[in-house]
Amino acid sequence: MTFDDDHPIWDNFSGGDGHRGHADWSATDGPRAAAFYEAMDDRARSFLDLLIDRPGELLDAGWIADEMFGSDPAADKTGRRRRVARSIRGMSAAHTTSGLRYPFKWFKGRNGAATQYGMRPHVAALFRAARR
């Protein structure tokens, strides 16, 4: 399922310090998006690329782990999901420099379900242009 920019789901994310007290990304933030994207290490960039290429979708952390690290049915699912979360740590300096929220939203899994991550379509468009 794909959600447009104005869907209420984007206001019901799990949040965290990287989202509180910061402005969201807007159409005028192209230069900031370019600087943010350029500052990423390979893992963080891989994570962002998955979200950029699927604007408005909520992506399961298990699926993201398969895409980033390769599929491994025998591996510990929780450990693989944590690897995804650790890859986001590589964004902290760029996040601070940008002065904006992280460019994605995350939604905590409930009752054993995986966390989900998503990027609003307008933010994905900014980062797609930055990636070029």
Image: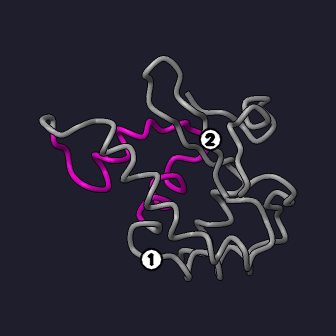
Disc 2 + disc 1, Cβ < 8 Å: no
Q: Check residue 20 in the rendering and tell me which mark sits there, or answer none.
A: none
Which x, y percent locates residue 52?
54, 56
Helix, strand or loop at label 2? It is: loop
Residue at position x 55%, y 43% in the image: 117
Q: Is residue 3 left or right of residue 74?
A: right
Q: Say which quadrant the N terminus sits in.
A: top right
Image color mode: one colour
Q: Which residue bears the numbered disc 1?
A: 41
Kindly give the residue lying farthest to the top in the view shown. Answer: 111
Residue at position x 72%, y 74% in the image: 96
Helix, strand or loop at label 1? It is: loop
In the rendered view, would you say 21 is above or below 16? below
Whether residue 115 is in magenta: the answer is no
User: Range of the magenta residues?
Assistant: 46-72
Whether residue 52 is in magenta: the answer is yes
Q: Disc 2 or 1, which lies upstream in sequence? A: 1
- CA separation, marks 2 and 1? 24 Å
Which x, y percent locates residue 132?
53, 77
Q: Which residue bears the numbered disc 2?
A: 56
Q: Is residue 105 left or right of residue 112?
A: right
Residue at position x 79%, y 61% in the image: 25
Q: Residues within 10 Å of mark 1 (few under 14, many from 20)?
A: some
In the image, what residue type sits under mark 1? Asp
